[in-house]
Amino acid sequence: MKRPSLLIAVWILSLLPSGALAQNDMLLSDPESECALAIAGESNVDWDGPYGRGYDVFDETIAYESIEILVQHTGGACNFILTATPVSSGGRAVLANGTAQLEYDVLRETTGPSIISGSLEGTPSSRIQGAFGPGESMAAALLSIYIPPLQFVESGTFDGQFILRLYREDGASSTLVDERPVTIIAPVAARLRIDAPDFANGSTVALIDLGELSGGARKDVAFDIRSNSRVNVAVSSANRGELAHETAPTSIPYRVSGGGQLINLSDRAGRRIGSSFAGRTFAVEVEVPPGSYPAGRYSDVLTVVFTTE
């Protein structure tokens, strides 16, 4: 007797180094007047990621988004301090989507150090310090927003804020003269990865040999799923749940279960499984009952489709 087979197809759907700021001298104002300072520049960051699609939980690429911050000065000479404090519970630099959190940092350029601190006046390592002479001038700096890769969070839009605070140094003390909130928005795309041992070298097609059918047959095909979104699984059969004889007009009905539940192959309705944050195995179980079947080769094409919501 020829050996029957079952074909399964899977379709997977900154600031300058050492805290210095670049300074541009402008038209002089009254050098005898009091030093006046203000923050200007960008206040919103759209984190697009290295490929313009937001944050990808499976991507190991290091990426940054940059914003330009200005410190404007008029009047007499003075020194200043610029600090950054996250707006979140616990003082952690996180973007939130409901209860899910995505860690981030704000660096001087892309090499650091971090300017984020839980202290309003910063720490020695996080403060940006500078000095202005008398007159009117401006200091410009580039800050880099960094979201570490491989944070496995659910899909959706994450957002958060940090506050830039500008202090004027007055001898041994400092005075808060301006502050500016900066909002970060980072979309996290729904992503899906599937590993299937029966599918060699990343192929999406596998030939499953069921062996001799007269005594019945069973085969389990495992799909290891990892996704940051809910996953829908749809299973369909080219022959509506029957193994068709290669030449004769006869067929053998068989059963398919997915995730332990019987799947109706008379239509294309699928079954949904939940978010698989820690990894999950979805097993497709093919079972042929024992019987006296005409000799020959039987086959069907079973298609398993995984999609994210």
Image (cartoon, helix red, strand yellow):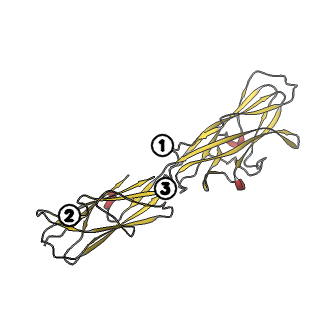
Would you say 36 lies left or right of 300 here? Answer: right
Q: Kindly report which numbered mark, 1 or 3, lies closer to the viewer in this rendering.
A: 3
Q: Please tell me which of labels 1 and 3 falls first in the chain.
A: 1
Q: Which residue is mark 1?
A: 51
Q: Where is residue 63 drawn, in percent x and y?
A: 54, 46
Q: Kindly report which numbered mark, 1 or 2, lies closer to the viewer in this rendering.
A: 2
Rendered image: mark on residue 299:
2
Q: Which residue is mark 3?
A: 229
* Mark 2 to mark 3 CA distance (whole Å): 34 Å
Quadrant (top left/top right/bottom left/bottom right) for the N terminus:
bottom left
Compared to residue 127, the image places residue 295 above or below, namely below
Q: Please tell me which of labels 1 and 2 falls first in the chain.
A: 1
Graded by Cα atoms within 10 Å as few (under 14), some (14 to 19) or many (20 or more), the crowding at tag 1 reads few
Compared to residue 41, the image places residue 12 above or below, namely below
Q: Are marks 1 and 2 in contact (CB under 8 Å)?
A: no
Type of amino acid under label 2: Ser
Compared to residue 116, the image places residue 27 above or below, namely above
